[in-house]
Structures are given as structure tokens and as C-alpha cells.
Amino acid sequence: MSDVVTLERKGAIAVVTVNNPPVNALGIAVREGLQQSFKAAEADPDVKAIVLVCEGMTFMAGADIKEFGKPPKEPSLPDVVNGIEAGSKPSVAVIHGTALGGGLEVAVSCHYRIAVKSAKVGLPEVKLGLLPGAGGTQRLPRLVGVAKALDMIVSGNPIGAVEAHDLGVIDELVEGDLTAAGIAFAEKLLAEGKGPRRTGERTDKLDGVDNAAAVAAKRAEIEKKMPGLFSPQRCVSAVEAAFALPLAEGLKRERELFAECLVSPQRAALVHAFFSERQASKINDLPKDTPVRDVKSAAVIGGGTMGVGIAICFANAGIPVKILEISSEARDKALERARDTYGMSVKRGSLTQDALEQRMTLISGVTDYADLSDVDVVVEAVFEDMGVKQKVFEALDANCKPGAILASNTSSLDLNAIAQFTKRPQDVVGLHFFSPANVMRLLEVVRGEKTAKDVLATAMAIGKKLKKVSVPVGVCDGFVGNRMVFQYGRESEFLLEEGGTPEQIDGALRKFGLAMGPFAMRDLSGLDIGLAIRTRQRQTLPAEFKLPVVLDKMAEAGLLGQKTGKGFYVYEKGSRTPLPNPELPAIMEAASKEQGIERRELSDEYIIERTIYALINEGAKILEEGIAQRASDIDVIYLNGYGFPAHQGGPMFYADAVGLDRVYARICEFHEQHGAWWKPAALLEKLAKEGRKFADL
Ligand code: T1G
């Protein structure tokens, strides 16, 4: 067979074992080994049944994503699974871990499936811009019905083995040794005289149901929720073939649709996003075996929204956490806020009351720094003022045990200055959470000049434990994400002064794929934040860095966003639906006049260039300065913290897709027309002139 797939006969049972770490991906060697093993078992007269099991952490977790975009190698996965299903001897898949994508397609081409309770099964291909391309769209509907199959395939979300058992995907839930369980099940089949049960031949879950209605409903849902995506509608078309065509033709239709998705730019972008997220956790100058400090307890300084959100992250990871506040009242308020936050999850049904109580036992409140003498990590989440930070870090330095990690959640202050407030700058690191901290997956791990390597490694490990997407960044104003979003926000304000409206600009960016446009976002977070930054910039920036005046005029008119019921939009009482603000045209006109600008019609394309290229140019500067390790790290930050559409891959991936020569040329034009802010990044100029991409770095 091959070194990743072995075949062993135990009595009348052939055991096929896959061992291709880390996730038993179905690369060419596995496909060859599977095909050869099943053929050999089929040809061996002493073999009466076949068991398929995997070593390591999981059953096959899908096709080898690294193979996409490369010339296909035979045997294809469809050929392998069709061969397995056609076998004349009953075959049993033994599932543990996550049987995903091609892995589940192999399992459903086997005649029976057993699983451990903790296993999960799913078809996540849509999250990679694909669809199940090895029979999943034809066989899963035959097991669970069209409606459920559509839900699973279009969402890409896995289900647990217990639910899969209830649905009939799994025949038996087992425990203990996987191979032994598989052999026992196969022997029982033989004892009961049961032979092959081919999923592809079943129609019981397809007959007598209004499958067309399920298809129509799903198409309408996709149109509403994800209009810009390429593969979801094709997933539906493939499932439609499962009840409209015989199996062979349905499989052919599936391959045609899969081929369309495989070559779509969205597939390339989504696969880039998948691998970039995993690459981001690798730090170039940090040896893989860098020791990680023990983190068994935590503390958060400040029980405001951010502090409580961060405390909840620790509690959710099973780490006891103390919230330190300046008074018993504030401490109690913070604990109440934590309970209320969990209470909302209980109301939504995503958490049980018991789980709430259990989590709350992990969160305690203190008012004395001496109570932090035993904790392994402290995250400071107090007001963004250097004086306040200094008091906090001096107190931490005086009270925390040697070796405790002292982290700041600062979003813009100088971490190196903060570290200097302690005698242990090597133990200071930034953990920049994004609000709401218990929801947003992104965590910028800020590496100070003096941050020790094991502290950095520990901070990354904390991020993984808290189920965050952790990205290491250097120290500068705004680190990576906020530094880039400042450019994007400023340009969107200028566009208002040049002739755009909030509706048009937000609409263009939503069409590009952002979850929310810049002005709806501003109204949500409050205009006063941006106003404070503009005021600070007016005092510090050289004159050639012109600033928009629109925020100042809106503040004068009392338009500060949702909290005042009106900002760029107006909001009816109790509603968050943005409606056009009739006061805005006059304010825009006045701003244009004051800036000496003749208002003009703006195209959607121009809006995208002025906002997204501002991100790209700043991203290139961030790379030049070494604030981010890779262009893909910048993509990961922007995808996970700022709602950038994953099917566009991230600002830097998008720039490569547009072509750096074109991006650079437009930025040079903007530099001429709009001055200093648009000075092209030297790196961008270099790459454009050399005909290279950010991905080539
Ligand atoms: N192919 C190649 N490498 C993969 C991989 C895959 N399918 N899945 C994971 N890896 C690598 C990953 O890059 C990382 O590498 C290491 O394994 C550990 O991953 C025909 C076409 C299985 C839930 O979409 O969801 O089948 O960084 O850090 O957190 O219809 O990996 O160590 O070098 O994520 O424990 C469908 C994708 C493919 C599943 C494990 N399958 N993987 O999570 O580990 S398309 C998927 C995951 C398909 C067929 C179609 C997760 C996991 P490195 P990890 P984890």
C-alpha cells in the first residue's frame, strides 16, 4: 500500500488505516493508498468485510487544500469514493475527531459508519469558496434529506456525532479502541448476514418531500444573506441534482459545478484566508520550542466593557480570573456586568443557566493589588491615558510575582513607554482585544522592544487558549488594524466633502463585501472617538496633511451617532436601522464650501479605490517598518477585526489581485490630487516597478 495507508487482515476483516498527520488530509498518497487497499481487500477471498480507520487526532479532515490550483493528480477523490461504494463487501468507516469535506465524503461512500460521541462531521467546502466535490452533494441528501443537507452544505458548519446518529448518518456511537469497535461492528454485520448498503442507491429520504421548495427557500436565503458569494448558489444547484437526476448524472453535475468554483477568484481568496490565519501564529525569530510559561490564573485591571469582556474570555477558557476595580461598588458592578453578558447568551439559547453559574465561579472581584500576587497573567484594560497606565503598571510591578506576564490592552499608546513603568519590561506585552472582547476573534499581540521571547510565546499561547486569532505586531500608533482604519476613515470623510453621501459610500463598500460601511460603523461606535483623533491630529500634524472638517460640523450640530439618535443617519427610538439624515446635505455643502471643493458625482469604483487603496498603502508602510511580519498577517488582522470580506482575501491579497502596478499608479494620481496622505509607500513602488506581488515577499 503506501506509508500513509496500510492494509491488515484480522480474521475475515480487512482493516485499512490512514496515517497522514496532522489531519489525515486526502492528498495524492492517501488517495492512492485508499484505492489500492480497497481493491486488494475486494480481491482477497478471505476478506468478508472492510474497516476504515485513521490514526492521530482525527478522521480524514478533507482534501489536501494545498493541492488546489495545482494540476490534478489521479486518482481523483470522486474515483476513490465511487470505488469504495461499489465494493461487494460491507465497509465500515470509524469516525473520530472531525470528518470534514472529502473525509465525510469517504465515510458516506462506505456502507456503514460508526463514531465516537465527541466526533463531528461536516462539509465546510463552502467556506473555501468550493462545494463538496466527491459525492457529498449527492450522498448526504440521501442520508439526511434535501433540506438538512442544504443547511449543512451551504453553512459549512459541522454537526456532532449524536445529532448525526439521530439523522442516520452514523449507525452506532462507540467508545474505546477505534479499530476494535470497527471490527466488532463489521463482525456483527456478517453475523446478521448484512451486505453492502450503498448510500448512492438510497432514495427513501428524497421521495415524498417537496425538495424543490427546500431549494427555492435556500436560494432566497442566500440571495438575502450572502449575495456576493460565488459558491453557495452552486452548492444548491448540486444538491438539486441529487433528486432531479440519477446518481451518475448527479455526480457529473456536481463535478461541473465544483470545477466552476475551483477556478473562481473567491476560492483563491478564501484558501488564502485559511492558510494565512494559521501562518500568522508563526513568529519568524521565535524558535518553535521556545518555552511557554504556565498560565493557570489571570487578572484584569478595570471592569468596564473591555475589562469584563476580557475576563469572560478567560472564564470561557476555564481560567480563573480576578477583576480589579478601584472600589467595591465598581467591583460589584463589573461582576454584575459579567453576569448580564452571560445572561444574554442564556436568553439567546447559546448558553445554559448551569454553564453561566459555572463560568461565574471562575470570575471574582478584588480592589487591592496585593490580591494579584499569585496570578500568572494580568491584562490592564483601563482608560487610554498614560498617567493612568503608569499608576497601574507601577502597582503591578510592586505586587505581582516574578514571572507574571503584565499585558496592556492599550489600542494606541506606546507599549514601550508603558513597559518602562516597571522594573521588568521583559515581562510586558500588549494583548489588544477588539470590542466586544468576548465576541471578536482577533487579538493583536504587541511585541515591545524589551518583550522576552518566552513572554511573546506565552502571549500567543494565551491567545490560542482563548480561541482568538492571534497576530503578532510591533509598536506604533494604532499598531496594524487601527493604524490602517484611520486612513480608511479619513478618506471616507473626504469623499463626503467631495460629493458623496453616507448612503452611497456605505452602499459601495457593502457591495464590495464589507459587513458595514464606514458611516454606519461610525454611528455605531460614536463620532466623538473620531472627533478626538481629528482634534489631536490638528495639533500635531504638519500643515500639508489636510484634514476633513465634516466631523467637526456634525458635532456642532449635535450629530454624534446612534447614542444621540442621529449621526450620519437618523435612528428611530429603539431602532438601529439607519435612515437618511435630512440635516446632512446642508452640513456636507458647508464642509465642501469651507474646503473649497466643487461637489461632484462619485462612482462606486472610485469610492473603493479611495478607501481600500488607502488601506493598502498604509499596509505597505507597516510592512516596510516591520510592524507586521507578512502581508498575509495584515490580511488576517483586517479579515478578523474589521469585517473585510474573506472572499476578497484581505486588503493585501486584494491588491495583488488588482495588480500592484495599477494600485500604485492610482495612488500616485491621488498623491497629486490629494496631497501628503497619499505619498506612495516605497515598498509598493518597488514591487510595482519589479512586477512583483506582496505574496512574493
Ligand atoms: N488540507 C491541508 N492542510 C490542512 C487541512 C487540509 N484540509 N486542514 C488543516 N490543515 C493543516 C493546517 O494548515 C495546519 O497546518 C494543520 O493542518 C493543523 O490545522 C473534495 C474539496 C481539521 C478542524 O476545510 O477545519 O475536502 O499550520 O491548525 O485547529 O469535497 O484544520 O500546522 O502547518 O487548523 O486542530 C475541506 C479544514 C477541504 C477542513 C483542525 N476540509 N481544516 O483544526 O488544527 S476541501 C476543511 C480545519 C474538500 C472535497 C473538498 C481544521 C481542523 P500547520 P489547524 P485545528
Image (cartoon, rainbow, N blue to C red):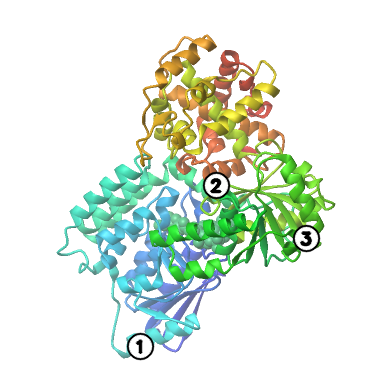
Dot 2 or dot 3: first in sequence order is: 3
Between marks 3 and 1, how big is the CA–CA gap? 61 Å
Please rate how many residues cluster around mark 1, counting C-alpha atoms within 10 Å: few if below 14, some from 14 to 19, many from 20: few
Q: Camera-side residue: 205 or 328?
A: 328
Q: Is residue 638 visible in this depiction of the protein?
A: yes
Q: For mark 3, what is the residue? A: 400
Numbered disc in front, either 1 or 2: 2
Compared to 199, does 542 lie above or below? Answer: above
Q: Secondary structure at mark 1?
A: helix
From the viewer's perspective, is 418 left or right of 686?
right
Please rate how many residues cluster around mark 3, counting C-alpha atoms within 10 Å: few if below 14, some from 14 to 19, many from 20: many
x then y, percent, for residue 73: 47, 55
Q: Give the residue displayed 32% in from the left and 51% down from the top.
A: 235
Three-letter code, disc 2? Ser
Between marks 1 and 2, how big is the CA–CA gap? 54 Å
Q: For mark 2, what is the residue? A: 435
Q: For mark 1, what is the residue? A: 188
Three-letter code, disc 3? Cys
Three-letter code, disc 1? Lys
Compared to 599, does 578 lie above or below? Answer: below
Q: Is residue 467 visible in this depiction of the protein?
A: no
Q: Give the residue displayed 71% in from the left and 49% down from the top.
A: 284
Between marks 2 and 3, how big is the CA–CA gap? 27 Å
x then y, percent, for residue 56: 56, 71
Q: Are the residues flagged by discs 1 and 2 in contact, CB closer than 8 Å?
A: no
Query: Among all residues in the image, which is located at the extreme right?
Result: 423
**Quadrant position of residue 42:** bottom left
